[in-house]
Image: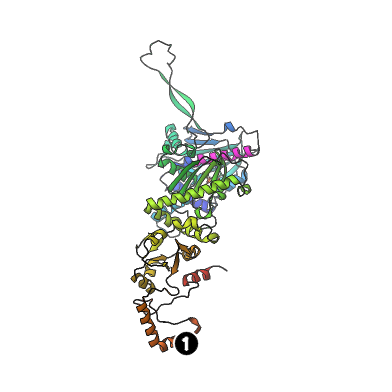
Amino acid sequence: MARKKQFKAESKRLLDLMINSIYTHKEIFLRELISNASDAIDKLYYQSLSENDSAVDRSAFKIHLDIDKENRALVISDNGIGMDKEELEENLGTIAKSGSLAFKEGLSEEEKKDEAVDIIGQFGVGFYSAFMVASRVEVLTKKYGSDTAYEWSSDAVDGYTIEEAQKDSCGTTITLYLKDNTDDDNYDEYLQQYEIERLVKKYSDYIRFPIEMMMETQKRVDEETAEGEEKPAEPKYETVLELKTLNSMIPLWKRNKSEITKEEYNEFYQDKFNDFHEPQRVIHTSVEGAVSFSTLMFIPGKAPYNYYQQDYKKGLQLYSRGVFIMDNAEELIPEHFRFVKGLVDSQDLSLNISREMLQHDRQLKVIANRIEKKIKSELLLMLRNEREEYEKFWNNFGLQIKFGVYNDYGMHKDLLQDLLLFYSSKEEKLVTLDEYVARMEEGQEFIYFMSGDKIENIDQMPTVKKVKDKGYEILYLTDNVDEFALQVLGSFKDKKFKNISQGDLNLDSEEEKKELEKKAEENKDLLGGIKEALGEKVKEVKISSRLVDDPVCLSSDDGMSFEMEKVLSAMPE
Ligand code: ADP
Ligand code: MG
């Protein structure tokens, strides 16, 4: 008997969660396992194509499902690439290679449940979802090109074992020994062929390899009636076993848009990109021309938990004629739209294209260009026609767009400036620069803005009150990057941006100016005294018309604003 190994701590926690099955959609385990099987076949398919390996019969690729009622087991087999011992250990002994799974301490049971659903959403449930329905899981696998097969098995609770085993051909066979039924859950469902068929159709229809199962069907056995002869009054049926392909095998992106339901898109997205949330937007297009391609892209409904962290991987999946080539092809998506998930399928790309080649591939550049334009136009449409939706998008990814304006020395500002939203003092909601400019007062020279940590706080600033009183609209900037973005933009529709806490605003009428001069003259000694007392700390002390109700305010010179100074001094050297 092989020694039992324990799961890594984080895996253990996720496993506990699976076993205790907080998750309500248990049935998705099948989708997860089928998608893994399909990935494994994809890998072998691609390897055999790119290495010109004639030993692989690509027409024989398939996923096979078996219902074993006697043992209350469901078996999922594939003839994909399989795993060697190290891979078994690495892939099924640890989870969430991409991030750490940290349950917060001291949560109530209810909060833990929410947290769990969240975590499942973030990581995707993957292989471990098997334990939502199975009390024991066996994985028999043999790597392509290897002579030795291995069996991994686990009841989750006591860890897992890996032993050498017998298997004729390469690929993986996963056996799920179903849990005992409880008052709440009937696991026998998954021994019903029609239920399995339904689940395959629902979740895995587009998988491009056949998903087969032996099915009991009623066959009429008295059909051999000769022509002209009358059919017998009582038709005869017999139950026969037939191998049936359960899925249509047409990739979703190859299907006609008008025939695809929202649910299908959503399922596809959630499955493929491991997102618990529905996508906010689906962008599905086909382009014919010098370079032909189809693309199916999604704007996530919520920013991934690691979106602003280093381990977030941007990029689209790349397919050539329906054959999966690689994940996260970064070159397909510009940095400022890195939140977009999806795939591109093109017949004009070589199957042998490598990551290194992507950067130089001309076709790919054309595709990337089209994709960037398409995303922009989709966002603009949303902004114009569905403002609330756009604001939702903005809450998720607006920061990215603002960084996009600022990054690369403003190279993308023309593309992105129309997508910007800022909070307006006048409208008391988010507005576009275009809307601001269209509303500008007669003779208003600048687009005014003011930075601060919170809308409410900015609104209380003395300078803001003054400018508002004069009837001008002010944009309130609350993100660190905002001011940098505006500085890079410089102007919008020939209107320069102006920080109202900086320099002379020139908002006073001639009369007001005269009044001010008079006051300055009268208080000359006082001002001089203050300047003397503050010394080098300030550049100048003057009487200002900046204030309405407040006695003093600090304002900066025309160079860098206080907010930018704060940001810069907070940056690592
Ligand atoms: P993901 O599919 O997101 O990588 P999973 O938890 O579903 O995460 O699977 C973990 C890993 O286990 C996979 O990445 C793959 O390397 C391996 N694996 C799972 N099922 C199979 C299979 N049927 N054949 C080969 N490898 C598999
Ligand atoms: Mg998976």
Percent across and percent down for residue 411 are 54, 58
Say if 432 sits above or below 152 in the image: below
Q: Magenta segment range? A: 32-56
- Kindly identify the amino acid type of the residue bearing the numbered disc 1: Glu
Q: Is residue 71 above or below residue 312?
A: above
x 49%, y 62%: residue = 489
Quarter the C terminus occupies: bottom right
Is residue 141 or residue 184 the one in the foreground? 141
**Is 282 displayed left or right of 317 in the figure?**
left
The answer to whether residue 41 is magenta is yes
Colouring scheme applied when the structure was drawn: rainbow
In depth, the one of 461 and 371 nearer the eye is: 371
Task: Looking at the picture, tell me which residue is in the foreground, 276 or 214.
Answer: 276
- Is residue 478 in the magenta section? no
State whether residue 15 appears in this view: no
Image quadrant where residue 447 sits:
bottom left
Image location (x, y in percent) of residue 566: 49, 71
